[in-house]
Each structure stands twice: as structure tokens, then as C-alpha cells.
């Protein structure tokens, strides 16, 4: 017995409340519909309908089975649609996550371009400064900054970024420019907690690694607030290079202590399905890869 076909017949009888009416809608003979329901009841070991000469009503078991059968057929229909359509043409809901400022500055323009190119896709953008589990959280694509630990994901490398120390030209003119990390102790420090969570700042140079304990006078939970405070001349801060690319370019912030920068961090686009991913994921990964590799504020290999 074709169980899916039997479910389809059962659902039609339940909704029509008649074997004869269901047979007409299904374009089957009435005996064929009756046999299908009888075989299904025999297979399940329960009676699905109470029958009289005038009425056909679901039993309690039949009512429960109706809900399950309808859901199963809907899932099958959706799976068929996905396999035949969404893997060829971008459609459906695309969920993308990225760090907050990276998402706001560099991913949001890509998303709007993507939506213009793909009118059958809706995007859910989730920006937060934590590492997400894209499988558990139902996400399609994540932009990840840092070294990857999960070998089960597919990753496309698009470049690298690093932590940089910076201040406004006005601040440096008034207070002097530190030439060595140890000189930071004599300066006003702005702590951007999501970019540099510890008040012990690590540095690297040609002679090795060193650490400096700083005493921030301003702690910012959002990197944007730290950028604003530094740009207005309050003090020195440490941020990711991609967060202040425009400020460094227009001169509102100055990059200092260049000889003591830490190693670069890779920027990757990750997803779960490789090249077998459906069209909405493949097309977004391709577009994002091209745009981020061309981004002047991301270093490239």
C-alpha cells in the first residue's frame, strides 16, 4: 500500500465527510476510496471513521491521525518544492549573522544588494558580538572573525583584520603620541569591551610578546560609543581595523603603535551545506565573497 496516497485519500474523506464526495474530488471510484481506507485502518490497527448511512465522522484516533497525516503531507510537498525549485532559483528566507559593527558597516550593504538581485528571497539579519552555532540557531550563513574550530562547517576565507590602537589627531597633539605600549599608562584610555574585553592589552613585536595593564576611564559596552569618544578626542582606544576603516581614511582617527600589533585574524563566511547548499545560500555566499574580498577595509592575502 502506498502510505502517502492512502493518507491523501483519508484526508479528503475526513474533509468531505463522505466517501462518495471524496472519490469525486480525487477522481477515483467509490470502491477504490473505500478499499484504501479499509487497508489503512487494517495497517494502523484502529478505526479511523464512524460510518452510518448518512454520516462519516472521525473517531478520536482518526482525529489525531488527521492532524499528523496533514502535517506529513505538507512537509513532503515543501520538500519536493525545495528540491525542485529552491536549489535552482534563490527563494525563501535567508538568515545571516555577523558581529554587530561588521554587520552594520560591511554586511548590510551586501544584503540590500542581494535583495535587489533576488526578489523571491527575504533576509533575516542577526547581528551580535558572540559566536553563534548556526545549526542550533537555525542560521544559514555566518560571517566569522577569528580562527575556526568547527571542522564540520564549510568556510570561505575573504581576508583578515586585526586589533589596532588609535586616537584622534587633536588628542595626540595635546598629550603626545606613545611610542611604546608601556607609555599607555600615562594616557586616558577608552575600553571597548566587545573589541578588547580585557584591561590587559597584549602586543607583539620583532622582539616578542608583551602585555600592558591599562586603567580605562571610560568603559563602553558598544564599540560605536568607543569610536565616538575617541574621535571626539577623549583618549586612546583599541578596536578592530574594520570598525574604524573610514575614520582612519578620513583622518578623524590616527593609527598608533603600528610596530606592536597582534597577529591578524581571518574573516570567513561559513555555512553547513557546501556547494550542495540551495540557491539562496550559494548566491549570497558568492556575492558576499566577491564584495568582501574587494573591501578596502579588509586586508587580503
Image (cartoon, helix red, strand yellow):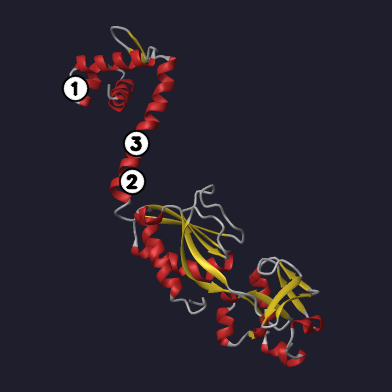
Q: Residue 65: percent from the left, percent from the top?
A: 41, 22
Question: Which residue is at a point 33% across and 50% down the rendered structure image?
Answer: 86
CA–CA distance in space, label 1 to label 2: 29 Å
Q: Residue 271: percent from the left, percent from the top?
A: 46, 56
Q: Which residue is mark 1?
A: 28
Q: What SS does tag 2 mark? A: helix
Question: Which residue is at a point 40% across and 71% down the rendered structure image?
Answer: 290
59 sits left or right of 25 in the view: right
Circles 3 and 1 in contact, beta carbons < 8 Å: no
Q: What SS does tag 1 mark? A: loop
Which residue appears farthest toward the top when viewing the image? 53
CA–CA distance in space, label 2 to label 3: 10 Å
Q: What SS does tag 3 mark? A: helix
Seen in the picture, residue 183 relative to 33 is either above or below; the reply is: below
Q: Which residue is mark 3?
A: 76
Confirm whether residue 45 shows in the render. Answer: yes
Question: Which residue is at a point 59% across and 57% down the rendered structure image?
Answer: 131
Q: Alpha-carbon neighbours of circle 1 within 10 Å: few (<14), some, or many (≥20)?
A: few
15 sits left or right of 65 in the view: left
Between 234 and 57, the one lying in front of the other is: 234
Mark 1 or 2, nearer chain start:
1
Q: Alpha-carbon neighbours of circle 2 within 10 Å: few (<14), some, or many (≥20)?
A: some
Residue 201 falls in image quadrant = bottom right
Between 285 and 111, the one lying in front of the other is: 285
Q: Residue 11: percent from the left, percent from the top?
A: 33, 24
Q: Which circle, 1 or 2, is nearer the viewer?
A: 2
Mark 2 or 3, nearer chain start:
3
Q: Alpha-carbon neighbours of circle 3 within 10 Å: few (<14), some, or many (≥20)?
A: few
Circles 1 and 2 in contact, beta carbons < 8 Å: no
Confirm whether residue 166 shows in the render. Answer: no
Q: Any mark on residue 82, and which?
A: 2
Amino acid at each position: 500500500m502506498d502510505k502517502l496516497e492512502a493518507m491523501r485519500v483519508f484526508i479528503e474523506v475526513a474533509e468531505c465527510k463522505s466517501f462518495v464526495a471524496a472519490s469525486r474530488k480525487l477522481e477515483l471510484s467509490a470502491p477504490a476510496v473505500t478499499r484504501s481506507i479499509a487497508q489503512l485502518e487494517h495497517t494502523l490497527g484502529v478505526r479511523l471513521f464512524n460510518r452510518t448511512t448518512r454520516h462519516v465522522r472521525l473517531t478520536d484516533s482518526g482525529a489525531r491521525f488527521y492532524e499528523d497525516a496533514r502535517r506529513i503531507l505538507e512537509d513532503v510537498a515543501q520538500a519536493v518544492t525545495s528540491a525542485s525549485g529552491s536549489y535552482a532559483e534563490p527563494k525563501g528566507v535567508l538568515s545571516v549573522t555577523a558581529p554587530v559593527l561588521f554587520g552594520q558597516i560591511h554586511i548590510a550593504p551586501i544584503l540590500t544588494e542581494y535583495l535587489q538581485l533576488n526578489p523571491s528571497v527575504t533576509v533575516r539579519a542577526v547581528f551580535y558580538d558572540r559566536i553563534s552555532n548556526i545549526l542550533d540557531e537555525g542560521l544559514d550563513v555566518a560571517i566569522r572573525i577569528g580562527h575556526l574550530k568547527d571542522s564540520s562547517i564549510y568556510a570561505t576565507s575573504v581576508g583578515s583584520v586585526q586589533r589596532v590602537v588609535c586616537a584622534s589627531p587633536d588628542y595626540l597633539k595635546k598629550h603626545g603620541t606613545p611610542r611604546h605600549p608601556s607609555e599607555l599608562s600615562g594616557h586616558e584610555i577608552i575600553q571597548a569591551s566587545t573589541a578588547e574585553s580585557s584591561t590587559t592589552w597584549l602586543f607583539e613585536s620583532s622582539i616578542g610578546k608583551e602585555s600592558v595593564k591599562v586603567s580605562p576611564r571610560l568603559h563602553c559596552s558598544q564599540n560605536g560609543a568607543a569610536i565616538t569618544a575617541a574621535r571626539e578626542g577623549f583618549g586612546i582606544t583599541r578596536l578592530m581595523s574594520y570598525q574604524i576603516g573610514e575614520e582612519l581614511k578620513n583622518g578623524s582617527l590616527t593609527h598608533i603603535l603600528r610596530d606592536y600589533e597582534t597577529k591578524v585574524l581571518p574573516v570567513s563566511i561559513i555555512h553547513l551545506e557546501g556547494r550542495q547548499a540551495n540557491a539562496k545560500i550559494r548566491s549570497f555566499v558568492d556575492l558576499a565573497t566577491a564584495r568582501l574580498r574587494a573591501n578596502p577595509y579588509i586586508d587580503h592575502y
